[in-house]
Image (cartoon, grey):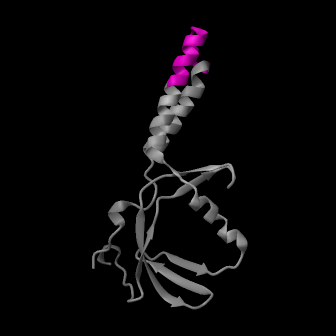
């Protein structure tokens, strides 16, 4: 708590999160990718009842959580049951695919025209994004000194 110059009550919990899930397509035919690390935050709960929970983070961020019976709030459960691709292996595969496309287009056209290389370069850049994805909360901030 010294790190952020804040005081949290005995009602403070540590909330842990899986890496962010990026979903592409619809729940029936889509796929998902897990990007970034697992993370955790400390959250104080100065007020809670059966409908609302007020939260304060270690850095002073304020949160308001409410209960809902809206069925749309459960739509994410379909995605959670699907197997998600991990981002790093997907990044390597996407880079390799981009390089292969570039090589194929150069071989077919027997030219080095930049326009023919654009699709391969786009796949390679996308692969680099997957490969280097950090995401989540900065790991250096995960634990509060007490």
Residue ID at (57%, 9%): 111
Pinpoint residue 73: horizontal percent, then vertical percent: 67, 70
Magenta part, dominant SS? helix
Pinpoint residue 116: horizontal percent, then vertical percent: 60, 19
The quadrant of the image that shows the N terminus is bottom left
Quadrant housing residue 114: top right
Q: Nearer the viewer, residue 31 or 67?
A: 31
Q: Is residue 123 magenta?
A: no
Number of numbered callouts drawn: 0
Quadrant housing residue 50: bottom right
Is residue 112 among what the camera can see?
no
Residue ID at (59%, 12%): 108
Picture layout, residue 113 above or below residue 138: above
Q: Which residues are magenta?
A: 100-115
Q: Nearer the viewer, residue 61 or 89?
A: 89
Q: Is residue 102 magenta?
A: yes
Residue ID at (45%, 54%): 36
Picture layout, residue 95 above or below residue 5: above
Residue ID at (51%, 23%): 100
Quadrant housing residue 136: bottom left
Picture layout, residue 115 above or below residue 77: above
């Amino acid at each position: 708590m010294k790190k952020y110059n804040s005081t949290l009550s005995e009602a403070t919990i540590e909330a842990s999160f899986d890496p962010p899930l990026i979903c592409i397509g619809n729940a029936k035919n889509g796929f998902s990718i897990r990007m970034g690390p697992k993370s955790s935050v400390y959250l104080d709960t100065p007020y809670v009842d059966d409908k609302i929970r007020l939260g304060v983070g270690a850095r002073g961020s304020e949160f308001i959580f409410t209960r809902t019976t809206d069925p749309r709030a459960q739509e994410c459960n379909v995605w959670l049951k699907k197997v998600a691709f991990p981002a790093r292996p997907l990044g390597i595969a996407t880079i390799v695919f981009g390089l292969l496309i570039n090589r194929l287009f150069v071989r077919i056209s027997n030219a080095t025209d930049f326009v023919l290389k654009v699709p391969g370069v786009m796949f390679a850049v996308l692969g680099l994004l997957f490969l280097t994805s950090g995401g989540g909360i900065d790991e250096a901030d995960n634990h509060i000194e007490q």
